[in-house]
Amino acid sequence: MVQQHETVHADLAVIGSGGAAFAAAIAARRKDKTVVMIEQGTVGGTCVNTGCVPSKALLAAAEARHVADRQAFPGIRTEAGPVDMATLIAGKAGLVEQLRADKYVDLAAEYDWPILTGRARFTDGPALEISLDDGSTQRLEAEHYLIATGSTPTAPPIPGLADAGYLTSTTALELDALPASLVVVGGNYIGLEMAQLFARLGTQVTVVEVLDRLAPLEEPEISDVIAGVFADEGITVHTATNLTAVERDESGYTLTGTTADTDNDGAVTARAEQLLVATGRRPVTAGLDLDTVGVKTGPRGEVVVDEHLRTHNPRIWAAGDVTGHPQFVYIAGAHGSLVADNAFDHAGRTLDYHHLPRVTFTTPNIAAVGLTDAQAIEQSLACEFRVLPLEYVPRALVNRDTRGLIKIVAEQGTGRIVGISAIAAAAGEVIAAGVYVIANQMTTSQVAELWSPYLTMAEGLKLAAQTFTRDVAKLSCCAS
């Protein structure tokens, strides 16, 4: 007989324990509300356990090896040896464990809310019935509920793929031996990061992308630059390729497909020891019994919410990846605190996403905020753009790496900047300044005349703005 615990009551019940869940719980506790959190897996969610933190830690390690192998400065000699993958992964695991304790587990204890380990599902009330890991069950009744269950990797329906098995961006970061060769399916941000990470550690990498260019959601000039970088690093790329079959034998995987490329009669074949599929993530809602309490889901499985993040049930809210919004942890965090304010203070808060930044942590970084040129046209905005190659940015010259550019899209007539894209070293830092430009509706003239520290990559933003009225090739150092 299953043991049934007495019903627990709380002001806020949170399903999930990632960025959105913790932000909501902390905000609720600061309002002196009681909180109970339910987690069926590892506390901390995707970012700290399997996403941002481990991938960026390994990308940094891979870059260190790459720089040692390809030293750009005269008079400096370095070399890169083979990678001890097991030790590298163990170091990553130690960092993840430390951050998980510092930023999640210990915080829950400090703010004084319990984390129940088990699987939650909605039942009439609304209430939650939780199947705890010890085999018992627990009923939880709350004033408000938050669905913050995140997302999980998904894969396209390629014949043979499911039977063959494959790595995801999660499982690939747990390998204890470096594969000799790897095919990465997907040329968007996750695929690009995974491809460069493994290539720089010493794996022979091939990327297969169904659209006609890498980084297909970014400006086309950025796609050209990252394609050149990948070519320089020996990464094979097949774009505009539809995979038609995946087979696996004792030595690895064979992928076949078709492409618009006329070489080889449009046929593509890629073979490697390992296969990594990085084609996106889907919201996690299975087993929650959302229909029972009137919570609706959309065509991609996302929980449908209004602008205040309330579901079709007025006492149930959703935040983060599970809502179908862009899958960034800073969105999840903002969602969580917003839900607490709207649920308990009736604040009626909404979020403005028009100056939301995005960064792909390849080297060079790909970063953007606001609209691309194509998106501005789709919105019937009369715009013009300028592209500044990094050969005109002093920081890139002294770095001895001028691969990259900064592109600004501005409204005709007013000069209001509506979009900034960059591919450069530290472009992720540059775009932080771009966020302020877009948020404050600044013009190209204003940015062109602002102070900017010399020999920073962010100075490229000012130089790119100056290209709207002058020829930056004829400027002296520090001259404006």
Image (spheres, helix red, strand yellow):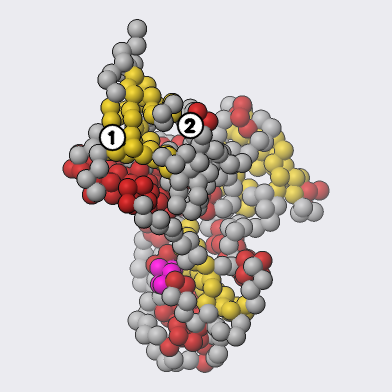
Closer-to-camera residue (119/457)? 119
Q: Is residue 182 above or below residue 197?
A: above
Specify the segment rendered in magenta: 431-436
Per the image, label 1 sits on a secondary structure element best described as strand
Mark before the other along the chain sequence, 1 or 2: 1
- Tell me whether circle 1 and circle 2 mark residues in contact (CB < 8 Å): no
Q: Is 433 contained in the magenta span?
A: yes
Horizontally, residue 384 falls left or right of residue 456, namely right
Q: Is residue 194 visible?
A: no
Q: Is residue 212 visible?
A: yes
Q: Position of residue 1 (x, y in %)?
A: 35, 7
Magenta stretch, main secondary structure, is helix
Q: Residue at x 49, y 82 (%)?
A: 443
Q: Which residue is mark 1?
A: 10
Q: Residue at x 36, y 52 (%)?
A: 346
Q: Residue at x 67, y 71 (%)?
A: 380
Closer-to-camera residue (32/439)? 32
Q: Is residue 417 above or below residue 475?
A: above
Q: Which residue is mark 2?
A: 293
Of the residues shown, which amino acid type is indicated by label 2?
Answer: Val
Q: Position of residue 256 (x, y in %)?
A: 70, 39
Residue 242, picture quadrant: top right
